[in-house]
Amino acid sequence: MGPALAASLQLAGHRPVAVSAVSDRSRRRAAELLPDVPVVEPARVLALADLVLLTVPDDALPGLVEGLADTGAVRPGQLLVHTSGRYGVRVLDPARRAGALPLALHPAMTFTGTAVDVQRLAGCSFGVTAPEELRLAAEALVIEMGGEPEWIAEDARPLYHAALALGANHLVTLVAQSMELLRKAGVAAPDRMLGPLLGAALDNALRSGDAALTGPVARGDAGTVAAHVAELRKHAPGTVAGYLAMARTTADRALAHGLLKPELAEDLLGVLAADSTTAADGPRGEE
């Protein structure tokens, strides 16, 4: 994420002066997106830059901030921006006490580490948390990167991040599992088959929410769901628990929104409950 955001700010007129990268992959990404920008230690980045982007994994952020503050690397008046979805600005308190100006700017986007990331920032929403006196600065930076600021309260950051992970990260897992199963079923190009279907489903869901639900669970086709579970147990037992969990959640939402008829829901939920017990017991073996 770091090189992409820096490259985007460079297009807006900012001048990248230094980058810190540890792994070979990180160094390659920096070289591709920020050519001629020197790779230095984190403390040296802070010594050179007026605006610092901390683009590290969530769990590494508190320790990094404390370490930089304890070593005196933070300068008064320096804009210190982290890109964690989980944290607001409170995690930057050690640096704030040293005079830094804290911002939390989290792009709601998946990154590849290539130049395409810069293009994807156009129109991307950013989850923004900032002190009142820095809201204009936060908004300006997001707009310069081509993004749209969405203000998130400090205490709502974990819920905000959980919502994004539920939608985006789990989607990748579901799609990957679906492609594997289609290959087992003999489909030569599962990506081509799924592309239009998933695109339409996503578009419908974003437009209509739960009203877009279709399929055997929403219809209450208990026999079809039972057949699905039996086939998954036979060919891909590792997918059964996820299928059952999503089917139960889908049934609950379909019921709540009047899509699943109550008289059909009983048999369906019975199938899901019975199979859930079997899934919890683990794979069946010979006795």
Image: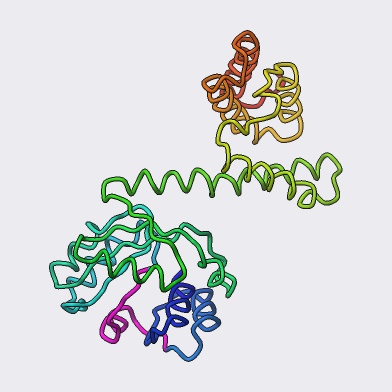
Question: Which residue occupies the extreme top position in the image?
Answer: 263
Q: State left or right for residue 171 relative to residue 44.
A: right
How are the residues colored?
rainbow
Q: Which residues are magenta?
A: 38-54
- 76 or 137: which is nearer to us? 137
> Where is the C terminus found, in terms of image quarters?
top right
In the image, residue 237 above or below residue 82:
above
Residue 231, by quadrant, is top right
Where residue 97 appears, x then y in whole percent?
13, 67
Q: State left or right for residue 126 relative to residue 75.
A: right
Residue 212, by quadrant, is top right
* Residue drawn where x is 35% and y is 56% of the image: 59
In the image, residue 213 above or below residue 70:
above
Q: State left or right for residue 243 relative to residue 166.
A: right
Q: Is residue 239 magenta?
A: no
Q: Is residue 53 magenta?
A: yes
